[in-house]
Image (cartoon, rainbow, N blue to C red):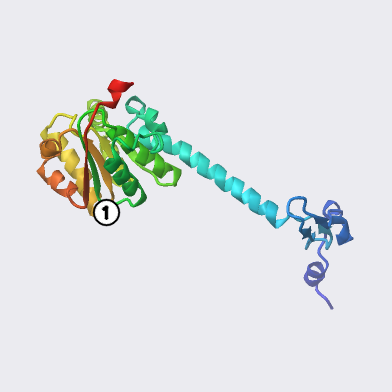
Amino acid sequence: MESLKSVIQSQPVIHPFLAKIGKEDPLEVTYVCEYCGTRVSPYQLKSNGRYVRAICICVKERERREARETQERNWREQQVTYTYSWLGKHWTDSSLQAKTFDQFDQMRQSPAFEMCLLFSKDLYGSLVLHGSYGTGKTHLLAAICNDLRGRGIASRFTTAPKLFRAIQERIYRKEDYYELIHKAVTAPLLVIDDIDKAKPSEFREEVYFEIIDERTKAGLPIAISTNRLADLAEFVGGAACSRLSMGQLAVQMSGDDYRMEI
């Protein structure tokens, strides 16, 4: 005699509502896609054997593409904060998010422009832009960050004075400042603009050494700017300066002050 369990398994009970879902005739839910012209066959439900309208492959692909584009757009928007406001809202450089290579007058600083483009395409070692005031060092460093953001690569940008003011603020509040050092150490690219603008001290040398040493050991690139390349060791310390020399691309930028023309 057949068991009750086998009877139930061989004759599954279908809820009256589910039993009415779909069409008995598959042709009723077969259609031609208005976008690609493909004849789309229906999907047969396992629960009741009836047919429902299926989604065309081209529509699925468009939805996936739109979802991916939305995700990428959201990521790029988040990266503005990641890149320019990572020290805190008081130390933001978000105004630089619009600086691009296209906006830069490359004829005035052609070697630096080409070197920054190369560095952006093949992140390696250390890039040092040095020279007189107002020659576009900050613009080019920001352009690298913004170019990377457009290609899905993260970076962190700051100036040396802001970096140490943010650290000092945390020390004053008896908060952990190592979080900032960790962010600087682990960023895919770290940019420190005006590295010679923070007055030298033993503490600042220690911070620079930890950041630069850890990034060097991890093979992570760094880009900096300074007005006085010859005195770089005075500001970051001899050991950190030595590590910056590994795989270094140093480009001098000289000429008229752009700011005087604005």
Q: Is residue 111 visible?
A: yes
Name the one closer to the observer, 22 or 95: 95
State whether residue 174 is above or below residue 107.
above
Residue 192 location (% of width, % of height) = 26, 37
Residue type indicated by callout 1: Gly
Towards the viewer: 192 or 55: 192
Q: Residues within 10 Å of mark 1 (few under 14, many from 20)?
A: few
Rendering quarter of residue 135? top left
Q: Quadrant of the C terminus?
A: top left
Residue visible at 83% across and 63% down?
A: 49
Query: In the rendered picture of this protein, how many numbered marks are placed on residues?
Result: 1
Splitting the image into 4 quarters, where does residue 92 fall?
Answer: top left
Relative to the observer, which residue lies in front, 98 or 90? 98
- Residue 143 percent location from the top left of the image: 36, 38
Q: Residue furthest front?
A: 107
Left or right: where 192 falls relative to 2: left
Q: Residue at x 64, y 48 (%)?
A: 63
x 27%, y 43%: residue: 111
**Residue hosting label 1:** 219
Q: Quadrant of the N terminus?
A: bottom right
Q: Is residue 184 visible?
A: no
Position of 6 compared to 61: left or right?
right
Q: Position of residue 243 (x, y in %)?
A: 17, 49
Q: Nearer the viewer, residue 251 or 175?
A: 251
Q: Is residue 179 left or right of residue 63?
A: left
x then y, percent, for residue 70: 56, 42
Residue at the outermost bottom position: 1
Question: Quick one: SS at disc 1?
Answer: loop
